[in-house]
Image: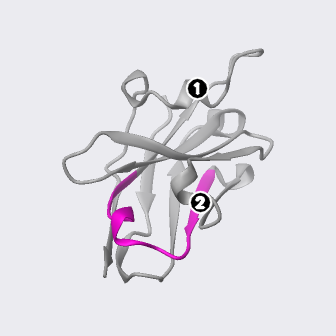
Amino acid sequence: QVQLVESGGGLVQAGGSLRLSCAASGSIFSINAMGWYHQAPGKQRELVAAITRTGITNYVDSVKGRFIISRDNAKNTGYLQMNSLKPEDTGVYYCNTKTVVPGSNWVAGLRNPSALTGWGQGTQVTVSS
């Protein structure tokens, strides 16, 4: 099982930027799709950005044009560059991975957080207005 450690969160003013990192143990990371999740206070965990092992990306509408997901398979690390941050981006950010079944909808497989295991501790992002 992949173990995940998120880092890079912090307190930032609206309009600012942060870069989150997701360090994964185990070589399976390099063949799995990866997602970044946002859990706002009192709300469900939500997939906001996802990337395949070959670099195909997908974003939820609220972060399109502001967030950039990337990965370095050689380093077993994923990243989320967060720009033009808004107060509603506040929350804990988690990463997770999932093996893609050939022929399946790879993003759909990441959209249900309850179907994934091995969550890390997350990293807190707080955006002040």
- Mark toward the viewer: 1 or 2: 1
Residue stretch in magenta: 77-93
* Residue at x-position 47% and y-position 83%: 16
Relative image position of residue 1 (x, y in whole percent): 48, 28
Q: Residues within 10 Å of mark 2 (few under 14, many from 20)?
A: many
**Residues tagged 1 and 2 counted as in contact (Cβ below 8 A):** no
What secondary structure is found at the residue carrying circle 1? helix
Q: Quadrant of the C terminus?
A: bottom left
| Label 1 neighbour load within 10 Å: few <14, some 14-19, many 20+ | few
Q: Which residue is mark 1?
A: 108
Q: Looking at the image, which residue sits at the far right?
A: 54
Going 76% across and 16% down the picture, which residue do you hit? 102
Q: Is residue 88 above or below residue 22?
A: below
The label shown at residue 79 is 2
* Closer to us: 29 or 87: 87
- How far across and down, in percent of the image, does residue 106 sit? 67, 27
Q: Quadrant of residue 97?
A: top right
Measured from the top left, where is residue 124 in percent x and y? 31, 63
Q: Picture quarter containing residue 128?
A: bottom left
- Near-viewer residue (12 or 121): 12
